[in-house]
Amino acid sequence: MSTPVRLVGASIQTELPVVIAELGPIADRLQLAREAIDELRISHPQSPDSNVKATYMSPWKSHLLNAKLLPLCASVVEIARAAAPAAWSGDLAALGLDLLVTHCWGAIYEQADYTAPHNHWPADLSCVVYLEAEPGCAPLVFSKTSAYQPQPGTLVMFPGIAMHEVPATPGRRVVVAMNLFKQLATGPAAAAAG
């Protein structure tokens, strides 16, 4: 039997922390990811139905289809672990938790391509890695109030519940996006928390 709940229509605006990282030290992993998108475009040419209205979008779990995305996934998890204490007030290892990339996809945006407003709930964290971003290409807009102007070789990471969108772009941008979920840690992280 379900418990009846009445939702209140009011909302409270809050700021959600967004992490931005420069990825120059892992340029080799960015290059592999860029190669993966081109390869996926050949092996999986049909873009999935989604709010991403881009020239091309790879399948949702592309990291399971092309191993060249796995090194970038590993780096994103490392960045999230390092950012968690300051950005989200949580030390994952101390809590006996780790992060897992569950979805990873690439997208190639050409002129007039866009992404409709959405969030990635129930993901704990989401991110966008900018492999290419022409000057003046469309920004990543959060809650219609804050925007990040993409720079090649950067990562933007945010809570999965954050509403965001990409307006119609006047220039090319190529990205890898990911969703991360918390999971119980295994190995050394679990031992440290025990």
Image: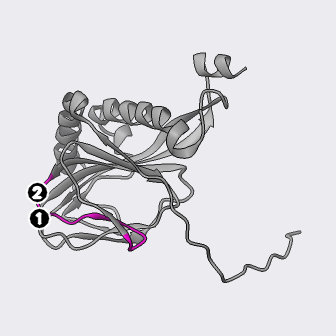
Q: Please state the extent of the stretch shown in magenta in the rendering.
A: 133-145
**Residue lying furthest right:** 1
Q: Secondary structure at mark 2?
A: loop
Q: Amino acid at mark 1?
A: Gly
Mark sitting on residue 134: 2
144 within the magenta span? yes
Q: CA distance from mark 1 to mark 2?
A: 6 Å
Tell me the chief SS of the magenta region.
loop
Q: Residue at x 60, y 27 (%)?
A: 93
Mark 2 Cα-neighbour bin, 10 Å: few <14, some 14–19, many ≥20 = some
Residue name at image x 86 percent, y 71 percent: 3
Dot 1 or dot 2, earlier in sequence? 2
- Side of 154 where 163 appears, left or right: right
* Count of numbered circles on the image: 2
Whether residue 161 is visible here, answered yes or no, is yes
Q: Position of residue 49 (x, y in %)?
A: 36, 67
Give the class, few, some or many, for how many residues have Cα within 10 Å of label 1's Cα (few <14, many ≥20): some
- The image shows residue 95, relative to residue 124, as above or below, that is above
Q: Which residue position holds label 1? A: 171
Under mark 2, the amino acid is: Glu
Q: Secondary structure at mark 1?
A: loop
Residue 54 highlighted magenta (yes or no) = no
